[in-house]
Amino acid sequence: MTGFNGIIILIALLLAGFSLTPKVRNNAWWQATVTPLASIIGSGFLVVAPLLAAVAGSLAVAAMLIIVVLAFAIGHVIRFNIRNSEKLEVTPNGSRNLLFAAKISNVSLSVAYIISVAFYIRLLASFALSMTPFADDTTEAILATVILMVIGLVGWGKGLKGLELVETVSVSIKLSIIVALLFALFAYNFKAGVWTADLPKSDMDILTRLRMLGGMLLVVQGFETSRYLGGAYPADMRARTMLWAQISSTIIYLLFVALIVPVLIYLPDGVAGDTAIISVSGHVAWVLPFMLVFAALMSQLSAGIADTVGAGGLVVEETGNRVPERFAYPALIAFSIALIWMFDIFEVVAIGSRAFAFYYMMQTVIAIIVTRKLLTGRKRAVQIVWFCVLAIILALIALFAVPAE
């Protein structure tokens, strides 16, 4: 057993060491991939499996597949807009409808980002203090405020590159722990000879299940951050690295859910809490709970920074470059700090989740407008129909989804 734990730690250390080498860390392609990848594999990673088990039972993997397929469909819209809409939005060729839709879209995303950054960092503080005698709402709020102030100061002093450096390190550590976790789960299942489990589903009705699955779309949210890194990376690189981030995160999510299902029988009374997966992982190897707590801290930090980066780029775009990114970051952080002290973040995260769905819907509307302008014939008709169907689905999620968190 001790040897197994040592192998898990060694795998994590080797991967972290490799990913933090200057050659990898300074690679432009990896730097452009880090921001969307950090946000996609954010706070939802450690809670998604217990939540899916509660909603879908033994069909958790199939439910996860539905979520990531929908996310890919939305990702296609964002990539289409990166390559086509951005140019029209900043030139006289952009129609009034396009500019109006873009304005509404960006405002909704700004609100969602401010809430999500506050949520990520508050959750980070909760994890950090969960195993100490200082775990209470006030102390967690104070710690979250300090962390947010540091992020704001780094963004103000170093700009995008400064935040990306912190983000790259945290993502590298987090991904190395996740890969070690996947190895540990595979080895555990292989030794036990069990690859599935008959998990009990809750007695909620089918409509509630669908609403919860719609809310869990936000677990894989974050790929849209590539849309707002235009000042640092060309459009084609952002579109391609965003696709790579989605492919990588999809593989990780599906493997994780598939491998963790047999272990979810140890969930206490089927409770799908924020830290449930940490205690469950102790049945696989005693070292995993400690590694997962650390991964959770890295996850919240990297996701919070990713959304801060995305929000900063959004402010620059909306102000026509009149407000530099380094001045936008502290202002955005100030709003997130205010949210932490004014509201229960678990209450306002529902508003943020719906804001993301509304943002995706508006991006689909933008894609429809651009398609009508740029394409012709059968390709134009098919794409418009597809975008309209997706817009309707997203509107339903925005109106009726129950947040995964």
Image: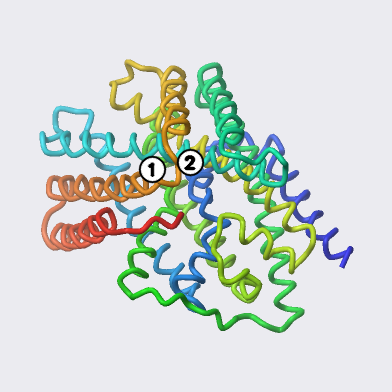
Number of residues whose C-alpha sits closer than 10 Å to that of mark 2, classed few (under 14), some (14–19) or many (20 or more): many
For image coordinates 36% across by 58% down, the residue present is 402
The image shows residue 62 at horizontal and vertical percentages of 45, 74
For image coordinates 66% across by 72% down, the residue present is 266
For image coordinates 10% across by 34% down, the residue present is 96
> Which residue in the protein does label 1 denote?
348
What mark, if any, has residue 119 been given in the picture? Answer: 2
Kind of residue at disc 1: Val
For image coordinates 56% across by 83% down, the residue present is 198
Which label's residue is closer to the chain start, 1 or 2?
2
Question: Of 176 and 234, which appears nearest the observer?
Answer: 176
Q: Is residue 243 visible?
A: yes
Number of residues whose C-alpha sits closer than 10 Å to that of mark 1, classed few (under 14), some (14–19) or many (20 or more): some
| Label pair 1/2, CB-CB below 8 angstroms | yes
Kind of residue at disc 2: Phe
The image shows residue 199 at horizontal and vertical percentages of 55, 79
The image shows residue 389 at horizontal and vertical percentages of 20, 62
Asked whether, in this view, residue 89 is left or right of residue 250, the answer is: left
Q: Quadrant of residue 146?
A: top right
Q: Secondary structure at mark 2?
A: helix
**Quadrant of the drawing holding the N terminus:** bottom right
156 versus 204 height, above or below: above
